[in-house]
Image: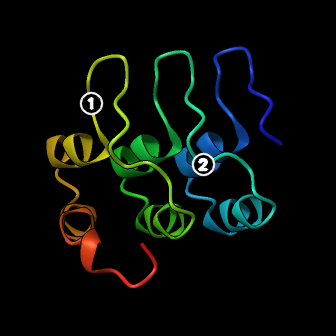
Amino acid sequence: MDQAKHNGATAAIMACQYGHHAFLGLLTKARASVDQANHNGVTPAIVASQQGRLECVELLLQARADFEKKSRQGNTPLMVAEHVGHQAILKLLRHRDWLPFV
C-alpha cells in the first residue's frame, strides 16, 4: 500500500495527483502513510495543494497529514497552493487550526 514506484510516488501521491479522493479515502481508512514523500520530497499534501484537489486536502487534514513538511525545494503545501493560486485550498490551510478534525 505504501510501496513507491520508481520515482517514489506512492498510491496516496498518485490519488492526489489525479484527484481520486474516493481512493484516497480508502487509503487513509486502511492507514496508508499520508506523509511518505517521493524522491523530490513531495508529499501527498503538496501534490493535492498544487493540483487544486480540495477534497484530497480535506481528507489529508482529517488523516492528520503533516502540512508543514517541506519538499527538497523548501516548499510547503501552503506555498505551492499560493503560487498556483488555489484560493479555496489557501483559505482552508490558513484556517485549519479552527477545523474540528485537525
Mark 1 burial class by Cα count in 10 Å: few <14, some 14-19, many 20+:
some
Q: Which image quadrant for residue 93?
A: bottom left
Kindly identify which residue carries mark 1.
Answer: 75
In screen coordinates, is 102 left or right of 36? left
Q: CA distance from mark 1 to mark 2?
A: 17 Å
Q: Which mark is residue 34?
A: 2
In screen coordinates, is 99 left or right of 94? right
Number of numbered discs on residues: 2
Q: Which secondary structure lies at badge 1?
A: loop
Q: Is residue 36 above or below residue 72?
A: below
Quarter of the picture containing the C terminus is: bottom left
Give the amino acid type for the residue marked by disc 1 in the picture.
Asn
Q: Earlier in the sequence, mark 1 or mark 2?
A: 2
- Residue depicted at x 68% and y 69%: 22
Give the amino acid type for the residue marked by disc 2 in the picture.
Val
Q: Return the residue nearer the eye: 92 or 17.
A: 92
In screen coordinates, is 54 left or right of 93? right
Q: Which mark is residue 13?
A: none
Q: Give percent across and percent down for residue 45.
A: 45, 48
- Residue depicted at x 20% and y 61%: 90
Q: Which image quadrant for residue 21?
A: bottom right
| Farthest bottom residue in view | 100
In screen coordinates, is 43 left or right of 88? right
Q: Give percent across and percent down for residue 1.
A: 83, 42
Mark 2 burial class by Cα count in 10 Å: few <14, some 14-19, many 20+:
many
Q: Give percent across and percent down for residue 62.
A: 52, 71
Q: Which secondary structure lies at badge 2?
A: loop
- Residue depicted at x 16% and y 40%: 83
